[in-house]
Image (tube, grey):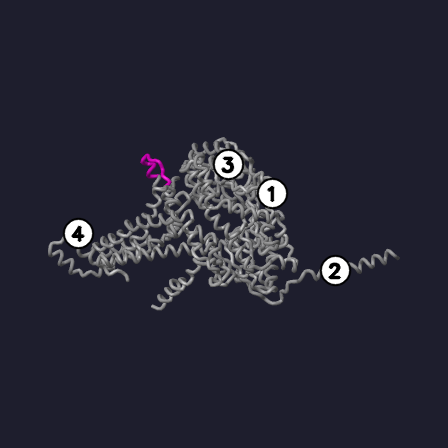
Amino acid sequence: MKRSVCLLLVSLLLLAFAPASLAETATVDMTDPIDIEIMAYFVMDVDPDTDPIMQYLEEKFNVNFTVTLTNIDNYADTLNMRIVSGDMPDWFRITDQSVYGQLQEDGLLLNVSELVDKYGFENIQATFDAPNASILATDGAFYRVPDTIGKLCRCIYFRADWLEELGIEVPTTYDEMVDALRLIVEADPDGNGTTGLTCYGLWCLEGIAPSWTGYNTWGKDADGNLVYWYEDDNYKEFLKWVNELYEEKLLDGELFVNSYETCMEKLNTGRAGFYMMNLNTTWWSNNATMLANYDPEASLGVTVPMLQGPAGAYAATDIGYYADSAFSSDMDEAKAARILAVMDYLLSEEGRELTLYGYEEGVYYDVVDGKKVQKEEVVNLEWGQALHFMGELADFGTSDMLATAPEVIAWYDYLDDPANCAPNLTGYFYNEDAVAIMAEITEVTTRYTTAFVTGEMDIETQWQEFQDAMNDVGLQEYKALLKEYVDAQDIELGSVLS
Amino acid sequence: MLPGIAFYLLFRYVPLYYLQIAFKDFRITRPVEQADFAGLKYFIEVFESVSFREALRNTLVINAMKLLICFPAPILLAVLLNELRSQRYKRTVQTILYLPHFISWVVISSILFNFTSIYGGLFNTIRESMGLEPIMFLGNKGMFRWILVLSDLWKESGYGAIIYLSALTAIDPQLYEAAAIDGAGRVRQFWHISLSGIKSTIVVMLILRIGSMMAGNFDQVQSLINDQVLSVGDVLDTFVYRVGVSNGRFSFASAAGLFNSAVGAVLLLASDRLAKRLGERGLF
């Protein structure tokens, strides 16, 4: 009897609490249709009136989308123009931290955290809880929805068939890569006048610099002081290595003139043996297709794991986010909640499937061996790329789910181990004074590092001059500002090697 | 007429109001009137910037080179075209000469890249066939300014000749006939009739050209410049874009832009005054 009474009381207690816990999460009212204006950059035009995925979402959430798209080069300027003229879109991407900083400080951005708590948007909450995402918050609140770039980071591609033809083992260290470059340049296997390693700018090649420094861009010394890698003797050694490649003509003499397209063309038309660029499903597929068109017998490889340098083997992974979605604060809660409901859906498993595979078998995808496979003609022609526009808007990293090439899967597995990654977690640092100082520091570093690589300046004798020039334009002031941010955000930086 | 006036009002006069951005701590999130007054802070930042003096020097040097080489070229071209007797041939040549004007600098930079590449580019292939070492033209500090000048010469000379051609056609043909009867050869006719007939047009164009010396290079330089040649190729327009606009430093960019315009205005007025001293009408 007592037991039954106890059970009854417990049940009553649970029932009493149940409505309360339900009341904690508000429900999004979908009764009235609302207009949502989106602004973003994309590879092609997307018309909500004709795009079936957009129409599907419009119907599902009782909304009408208006989409303003630009190419990526014009995006920031166009968005700035609209903000200045008081015509801020409801939903837009943030590519510039200084713009985010000004919008957030002046209260023009929606506090997403508040509504996520109130309406229980679990998928958006999951993006807040993801690794390193807390860096994107301001005073503990998110004014944007983090957009991951997935496993996109720089790797080294190479002509696998050339290595085989010349009897060269796939290199495991940078010294071995130099040996391979020498043999390739000397042999010129396709007779087109090949360069050894091609890349676009020193920035591109800095993807391997952590293998000399042990950290990416900013590190901490034993006393806890911040160190910019341009101050570090280990980075100096990296520059010497690059300079030697350049002098020996093993590095593309046009590296400062190249674009990523010209580099791809060189690699995939027999004019380069190695190429440093981003590796993910899309870039692998683009390179492999281009090479197959040039020579169906040719084959590509990638250096996974990354090659060993003096400090180890690291991939420069950066912070892992870019172009997050932000929302205007100038709208009522009902509209804001509806927009976030769309976003929350796009971040759900069902939403991700929708923007990867569409919603109709046979139209967007086929099922092969129980797995969905995109119909390439649809995604390439109608969507413009493998991930639908709304998928890219929500989470670019979703496209990683498409990986099928063994090389790409191996790369993703490699990056899953944090020990292999050298992230730069300061990428979202914003401070008006710091922006002005860094603009000047960049002017100095660009000029000196370029001159060091090409041999126009001597690294050994002019290194101190370089240090003085950085200090003259405020490197120490910048470090003080960054230190405050790093401490406040509790960012862990890599250790500077002694 | 009205669209023209509207254009100038909207795009030339209304923006003058926003020059105050250069003197204020402007943020894109607030109206310019609400921005705090900053005095000459941003001008000082511009003048203290490590690359400013370099960009100023390059702007003046590159434009002086263009003035010396690219300014006379359309005049010469117009006179040569004017000498052609076959109208059909003249029209064909004119069309071919005008065409480069309509090609964007982005396309031209791509063509130049392919022509000058050290890996199979046309120029270096020719050099190699002559037993010479390939040259990285676009990364060569000694050549980069000449590439800017010569590509501008190729692109704009034909189109720039139009105004001189129209001025030449306005010259009374009887003057040439009279000069020929008096025994004047082609060179003397060119010197005393053609050139003096279009002298006022040349002076006006020269004044305008000098006035725009500080601006107008952005598309060309931005398409062709790279880190290797920043010290000889970076001009004020690209400096403002790179250090100011692309970092969201709008007050800095406005201050640099205003300085640029002010120097341009001084050059315009000075050249106008010089023209008047030399007995020409000038602009104002």
> The numbered mark 3 sits on a residue in which chain?
A
Name the residue at the front extreme. Answer: B39
Q: Is residue B128 magenta?
A: yes
As measured in the structure, the alpha-carbon distance from the residue carrying label 3 to the one carrying label 2 is 62 Å
Q: Which residue is mark 3?
A: A233
Whether pointer 3 and pointer 1 mark residues with C-beta atoms closer than 8 Å, the reply is no
In terms of sequence position, does the residue under pointer 1 or pointer 2 come before the other?
A: 2
Q: Do the CB atoms of the residues marked 4 and 3 lie less than 8 Å apart?
A: no
Q: Position of residue A250 (x, y in %)?
A: 44, 35
Q: Are marks 1 and 2 in contact (CB under 8 Å)?
A: no
Tag 1's secondary structure? helix
- Magenta residue check for A483: no
Q: Is residue A269 left or right of residue A498?
A: left
Q: Residue at x 61, y 50 (%)?
A: A134
Same chain for the residues at labels 4 and 1, yes or no? no
- What is the number of the mark on residue A18? 2
Magenta region: which residues?
B125-136
Crowding at dot 2, Cα within 10 Å, few <14 / some 14-19 / many 20+, comes out as few
Mark 3 or mark 1, which has the lower sequence index?
3
Camera-near label (1 vs 2) is 2
